[in-house]
Amino acid sequence: MEEGSESKTEIFESAEDLYHDAPCGYVSFRNDGTIYNINKTLLGWLGFGRNEILGKKKIYELFKMGGRMYFETHFFPLIRIQGFANEINFEIRNNDGSTFPALINVKELKGPTVRENRYRASVFDISDRKKYEQELMNAKLKAEKLAQVKAEFLATISHEIRTPLNAIVGIGDLLSKTSLDPKQKEYADILRLSSGNLLGLVNNILDLSKLESKAVRLEKKPFAVRTLINSLIHTFKLKCDEKGVELISEIDDKIPNYIIGDPIKLSQILTNLLGNAIKFTCEGYVKLMVKLNPSSSEKSALNFKVVDTGTGIPEDKLQSIFEEFSQASYEVNLEYGGTGLGLSISQQLLKLHGSQIKVESVLGEGSEFSFDITYEKYSHSLNELDTDNSMQRKKLDLAKLLIVEDNPVNIFVISEYLKEWKINFDTAKNGKKAIEAAKKKHYDVILMDLHMPVINGFEASSTIRNLNLEKQPVILALSATSREAIESELDRAGIDDFISKPFGPEDLHKLIANYIVTSSEMEKISDPVQDEMGIISSEENKEASKKSIDLSRFVKMANNKPEFLQKFIINTLTAFQDYLEDFQKAVDLRDANRISELIHKSTMSVYYIQSDKLVELLRHCQICFEDKNTNPDKMESVIKRAMAEFHKVIISLKHTDVDTLMLESQIEVK
């Protein structure tokens, strides 16, 4: 009976009780915002009495100042338009001045006229939710910071290892080319093999740290996919011959000679897949196949496949092999060695391309790894560098190089390479010595270490670029730091290219030869280039040595206030560094529209510093890109001039002395 009474009480609980004692707040207000009803729960949170609220306060008076403005300008107009608004976050102010975060839902109750409309709102205190969100955010930030610290630690350790490793690899290579007895040759081979394995490990760790810290991005430049494949096959052929395994490549005839993409990342992915396939194959073959899939006229969709007749992978391990530091089994690790990073890194590199590795395998019969990448087609013809050509060999013989390096072992290694290639060179042990040498003697190429005492490689390169030299040298950076980490600094310093330590002799020779031969070819291009293209007249060439910028307009605008002039120059420098990135993208794609947009975007910046020469060169590039029949050599010449002018402008802005400029302007006025 008693139980039935309780049930009856529950059934007849009034709506008013439910309203006032609800676990959330309720408030009702008129069209002008005046509150005419409020429940006990919300009153308790606010610390007000009913008589202090009803008919005396408007709804927006419960909010902090920012909330009031938002309510009047956005929130209430939205409710009037759609009749409701859900889960809007407001900070509500209590009677004692404290606040709490709340989620508010509002519904409009239509009256006979708009003026008589009423509004009912539910209010949820989300203080606990905010607290938990903050704890989660703190945990997320802590995890991200730990990941960043880990990535930076790995990058630092890798950098410290790569510097002495460059000397070990170089000495091992040089030693193997000397006259050795069988025992010495065995020692030299062990040294080369061990240093090569260590280099592979360090590179993998560095790649992993860069990927984790989001420091890797794809480059877009023309490259010959067949040349890349043939180079990889040549690299792995010796290892396959030693194992008695056949190495086969099949390249679809329909694949264009040149495509636009990131050849380094592709080479890295294929190197990992081929290396794994050869490691786990003791008999039979390893085959690399590249096929052209159906695609648009502007794109080339390529399918890459590496097939082997090796040990195969158990079905339950097909996914775990892509995890970091993971291999198919403990026994595999013992027998074959390795870190288990190669496939993980390759999978992450393919994610940057919007792709992934697919794998099929039968235990004891072999495996098949495949992936797809879509590249842009490159419509211009390129000539491959042939360093065996007698004319090109002569250019190398006549070239003069400067090695700028503070590590005596590295100087020795590079010197031995250059002696072997019969290339003339001098040395400088820091950036200051390099600047002095560049003033006294012309060098075709400067090999510039970046991290040195006295003056580092970046500062030395910027200073050399700002020297009034008859002909600027090609500056190639040498560093154990990853390119992605210093890309913008390389551009700002006017450095032409980069080679990562440790490097093999073939890589160094190819880079040097490419720049010496290419720059020599550019000198042959007639000046002026075809008048009908509007490219650099003879008169303009006479002006080439003149300053690339004139800051007199900035000086006038600054009105004798150095701090204003400094701000103008810094903002303009930042803008031109961004313009240079836009120009590089336009050049990579040979996109005339991008050049046109760049000219338009830079109009005011160009006007203020009077860099008209740069605009003319940009227009010439635009004309070249629009004309599909433009001679590739002439196009490259114009691009190179525009790029050089960009660097001149940036370096001039970077090294402007504000006080001197202000003083000179005052003298002129007097």
Image (cartoon, rainbow, N blue to C red):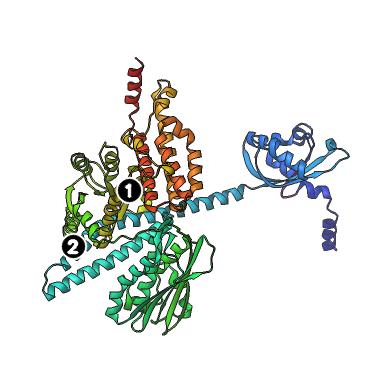
Disc 2 residue type?
Answer: Ile
The residue where tag 2 is placed is 171
Q: Are marks 2 and 1 in contact (CB under 8 Å)?
A: no
Relative to 331, say whether 458 is above or below: above
Q: Residue at x 89, y 39 (%)?
A: 112
From the viewer's side, name the closer residue of 668 and 178: 668
Q: Earlier in the sequence, mark 2 or mark 1?
A: 2
The mark found on residue 525 in the picture is 1
Amino acid under disc 1: Ile
Residue 544 pos. (x, y %): 33, 36
Magenta span contains residue 244 = no
* Circle on res. 397: none
Residue at the limit of the structure toward the right, as seen here: 112
Q: Which residues are magenta?
A: 22-28
Percent coordinates x, y for residue 101 in the rendering: 63, 43
- For the N terminus, give its image quadrant: bottom right
